[in-house]
Amino acid sequence: MNKKATFGGGCFWGIEDVFYKMPGVIHTAVGYMGGTKENPTYKDVCSDESGHAEVVEVTYDSKKITYQALLNAFWQNHNPTTLNQQGPDFGSQYRSIIFFYDDEQKADAENSRAKLNASGKWGDPIVTLILPATTFWVAEEYHQKYFTKRGIIPTCHV
């Protein structure tokens, strides 16, 4: 059964690269979610005024990969303790965020965040937001599979 999951972990190029290589992931697309502007562009989002986060929308086969496996990949590939920042990237568009599509995803995301916080792995509190999914706006084509298209080794995630 195909399902969707949406994650924001800083620059969407790096986090997309992680997800689309996972067995059971059918499709990924980078884009924008969580803001107020309709049909935002990269320029709008980078202005830090549209309210959107850079995200990756993951379509996955729930018979081949679990939502928990996607959550684990999310937590392992960015720093969830830095507010509105990942590495050298600053602004609310780079916030750590999970958008859920149903109550089960919400509970799983909240439980995984609580366990990771309790583990003390990061040393600082996790600031990742967990919110209901809103409209996903697909980013411009040149952002899709950015690193793969350019033959670049991803450098913008943990």
Image (spheres, rainbow, N blue to C red):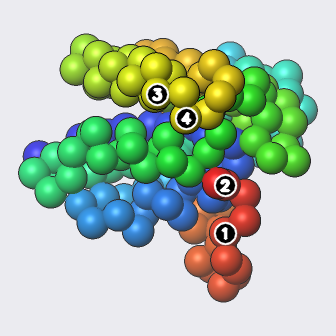
Q: Earlier in the sequence, mark 3 or mark 2?
A: 3
Judging by the rendered image, the residue that carries numbered circle 1 is: 154
Give the residue type that dot 3 points to: Ser
Q: Earlier in the sequence, mark 3 or mark 1?
A: 3
| Image x and y of residue 103, in percent | 25, 14
Between residue 64 and residue 87, name the one nearer to us: 87
Residue 141, by quadrant, is bottom right
Q: Is residue 7 above or below residue 17?
A: above
Residues tagged 3 and 1 counted as in contact (Cβ below 8 A):
no
Give the residue type that dot 4 points to: Lys
**Horizontal relation, residue 42 to residue 139: left or right:** right
Residues tagged 4 and 3 counted as in contact (Cβ below 8 A):
yes
Give the mark toward the camera: 3 or 1. Answer: 3
Give the mark toward the camera: 3 or 2. Answer: 3
| Image x and y of residue 110, in percent | 38, 17
Judging by the rendered image, the residue that carries numbered circle 2 is: 157
What whole-number distance in Å separates the C-alpha atoms at marks 4 and 2? 17 Å
| Image x and y of residue 146, in percent | 65, 68
Give the mark toward the camera: 4 or 1. Answer: 4
SS state under label 4: loop
Judging by the rendered image, the residue that carries numbered circle 4 is: 121
Between residue 49 and residue 63, name the one nearer to us: 63
Residues tagged 1 and 2 counted as in contact (Cβ below 8 A):
yes
Give the residue type that dot 1 points to: Pro
Residue 42, by quadrant, is top right
